[in-house]
């Protein structure tokens, strides 16, 4: 814990120096004292909460109350960090200054949010609360009567215009059995991992109607007609296992909720998802408004709108868990084959960590391959409906083309014109979704979208500590994360903080070389892109540097015969091409090794 506190104090000193604020010893004493009494929760929960209050205050134009921090008599700002906050807000009235210091804004956000995203295991109580919240979400969705939704007709018409060409093409390919399935990278409901997924032991009867085993499991019709399929259990709807809900470390405040799908369901979901995303990103109508791999569009809009205030950035709470299955049904209603297939590979029930099984009203939780693309399509459709409602007109092709240029969706990150924000929130919430007003910005000069935070056209995105400090050189993921942390702090001009991180890492793994940004090995970066030189390679006639690099751990495949041939058919077009189909890697399983690399200049 001491290293985390020391880094926090170094960041405070750098933020003050960069903002031309005199050293504030009382702030440092407050941090040390409160960590001693409150533990890490002060760094990971209380300070980030102060950062959220600061962001909302930028939006409101006046300092809002931060109950966890005391104020002096007659002052509006907390005594803590007043040297920095006083350069943004008036100390007495609390109103934002006419020319607030952007350096101070960036410094405050960095101090408060340094440990906001550090991955840590939650307490049992917080995991229990997360499960209760999951069930409450389902109860709220069950209370919704989708058929009475006021915007149902407009939403269906908008989706027909927006996605008609894409869904029609996908519907035809599905009917012609041309989709290419793929196993997901993670684990599955029964714990199957890696190449073992190719040995299919279960298939559902309702899935077989749209994804027949003759075309999606067997390598050819000869195998299908001659092979003994007694090992394959065909499940009726009542026999299908529920999706397995698990909690994985996210922050000390709350875990991340993941729904782990059965092998066969994920396999079919990937077939639809991969082709759907490809079609959407290449469709002439929607490709500029809906994004799945490129966050820079939303990020650029957020940066520019922090200056012009033309666009609002909108965020949703529990986004995937609140997309009612009826919304997806309406969106796909004109394409019956695709709709039936999508619901055939959807899990209808969920098993919670406590063992309780509940029916699902949502379409899918995070973990389903169809969750991300379908939720983005639903959000875009609703944003279009809201924009047209603001104008008081009905959806037509020409009108939708016009308003689409001003709407951008990446997952649950949405940007809309300021004039349409109120109606967009109304449409979303009337369908059971929940807008996170704490992370929705429109009135002030602050914007946040897709990892980009900006104020008045200037980036104020903080650097985050993602993992706890590495304890030894075997902890490769933490070493890699902290080397990256040191380089990010260096790039921001946080010299004390960077120096502290470098010394901490080198005490653990030894001397880390300087490398260029293009180097395959981990190392420290410099403004001049300097590289340490360790030797001259006579054979290759070049300088070399030796350092650590991360490698994915490879496992020998235990499948053979027809399963191995099936894997080859399904992965031969994968980029980058696997070195061998007889090996596989698992996500988040990597090792750190020393290697030589060119000392690029």
Image: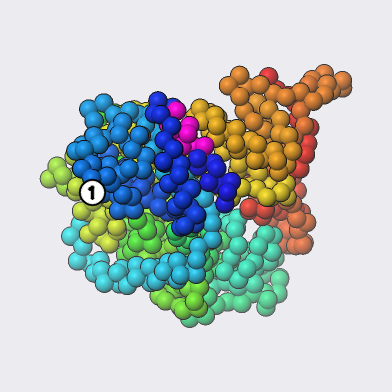
- Magenta range is 10-17
Chief SS of the magenta region? helix
Q: Residue at x 50, y 42 (%)?
A: 8
Q: Residue at x 37, y 50 (%)?
A: 49
The answer to whether any part of residue 545 appears in the image is yes
Q: Residue at x 63, y 53 (%)?
A: 587
Q: Is residue 81 above or below residue 21?
A: below
Relative to 9, is 585 on the left or the right? right
Instruction: Name the one closer to the observer, 133 or 41.
Output: 41
Residue 73 placed where, x, y %?
Answer: 23, 45
Residue 70 placed where, x, y %?
Answer: 31, 49
Q: Is residue 188 above or below residue 481?
A: below
Does residue 411 show up magenta in the picture?
no
Which of the image's four quarters has the C terminus? top right
Secondary structure under tag 1 reads: helix
Residue ID for mark 1: 424
Residue found farthest to the right: 539
Instruction: Name the one closer to the observer, 24 or 120.
Output: 24
Residue 5 placed where, x, y %?
Answer: 53, 46
């Amino acid at each position: 814990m001491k290293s985390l506190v020391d880094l926090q104090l170094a960041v405070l000193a750098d933020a003050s120096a960069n903002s031309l604020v005199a050293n504030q010893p009382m702030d440092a004493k407050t941090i040390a004292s409160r960590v001693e009494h409150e533990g890490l929760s002060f760094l990971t929960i209380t300070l980030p909460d102060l950062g959220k209050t600061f962001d909302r205050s930028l939006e409101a134009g006046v300092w809002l109350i931060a109950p966890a921090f005391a104020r002096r008599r007659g002052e509006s700002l907390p005594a803590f960090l007043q040297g920095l906050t006083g350069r943004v807000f008036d100390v007495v009235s609390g109103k934002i200054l006419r020319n607030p210091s952007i350096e101070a804004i960036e410094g405050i956000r960095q101090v408060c949010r340094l440990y906001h995203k550090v991955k840590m295991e939650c307490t049992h109580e917080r995991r229990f609360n997360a499960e209760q919240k999951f069930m409450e979400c389902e109860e709220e969705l069950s209370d919704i009567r989708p058929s009475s939704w006021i915007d149902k007709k407009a939403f269906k018409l908008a989706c027909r215009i927006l996605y008609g060409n894409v869904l029609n093409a996908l519907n035809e390919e599905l009917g012609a059995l041309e989709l290419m399935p793929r196993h997901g990278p993670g684990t599955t409901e029964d714990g199957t991992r890696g190449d073992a997924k190719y040995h299919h032991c279960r298939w559902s009867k309702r899935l077989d109607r749209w994804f027949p085993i003759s075309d999606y499991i067997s390598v050819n019709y000869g195998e299908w007609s001659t092979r003994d399929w007694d090992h394959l259990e065909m499940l009726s709807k009542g026999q299908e296992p529920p999706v397995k809900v698990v909690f994985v470390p996210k922050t000390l405040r709350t875990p991340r909720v993941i729904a782990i799908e059965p092998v066969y369901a994920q396999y079919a979901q990937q077939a639809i998802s991969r082709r759907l995303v490809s079609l959407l990103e290449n469709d002439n109508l929607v490709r500029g408004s809906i994004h799945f791999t490129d966050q820079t569009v939303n990020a650029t809009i957020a940066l520019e709108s922090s200056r012009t205030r033309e666009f609002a950035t909108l965020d949703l709470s529990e986004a995937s868990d609140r997309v009612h299955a009826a919304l997806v049904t309406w969106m796909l209603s004109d394409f019956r084959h695709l709709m039936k297939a999508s619901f055939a590979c959807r899990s209808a029930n969920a098993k919670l960590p406590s063992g309780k099984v509940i029916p699902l009203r949502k379409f899918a939780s995070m973990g389903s391959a169809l969750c991300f693309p379908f939720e983005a399509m639903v959000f875009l459709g609703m944003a279009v409906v809201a924009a047209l409602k603001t104008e008081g007109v009905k959806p037509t092709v020409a009108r939708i083309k016009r308003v689409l240029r001003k709407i951008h969706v990446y997952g649950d990150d949405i940007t809309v014109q300021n004039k349409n924000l109120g109606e967009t929130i109304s449409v979303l919430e009337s369908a059971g979704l929940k807008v996170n007003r704490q992370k929705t910005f429109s009135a002030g000069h602050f914007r946040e979208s897709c990892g980009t935070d900006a104020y008045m056209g200037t980036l104020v995105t903080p650097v985050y500590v993602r993992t706890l400090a590495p304890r030894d050189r075997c902890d490769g993921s933490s070493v890699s994360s902290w080397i990256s942390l040191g380089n990010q702090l260096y790039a921001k001009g946080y010299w004390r903080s960077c120096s502290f991180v470098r010394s901490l890492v080198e005490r653990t793994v030894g001397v880390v070389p300087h490398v260029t940004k293009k180097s395959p090995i981990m190392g420290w970066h410099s403004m001049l892109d300097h590289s340490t030189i360790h030797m001259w390679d006579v054979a290759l006639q070049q300088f070399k540097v030796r350092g650590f690099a991360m490698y994915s751990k490879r496992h020998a495949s235990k499948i053979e015969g027809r399963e191995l041939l099936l894997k080859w058919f399904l992965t031969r077009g994968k980029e980058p091409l696997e070195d061998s189909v007889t090996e596989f890697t698992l996500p988040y399983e990597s090792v750190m090794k020393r290697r030589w690399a060119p000392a690029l200049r």
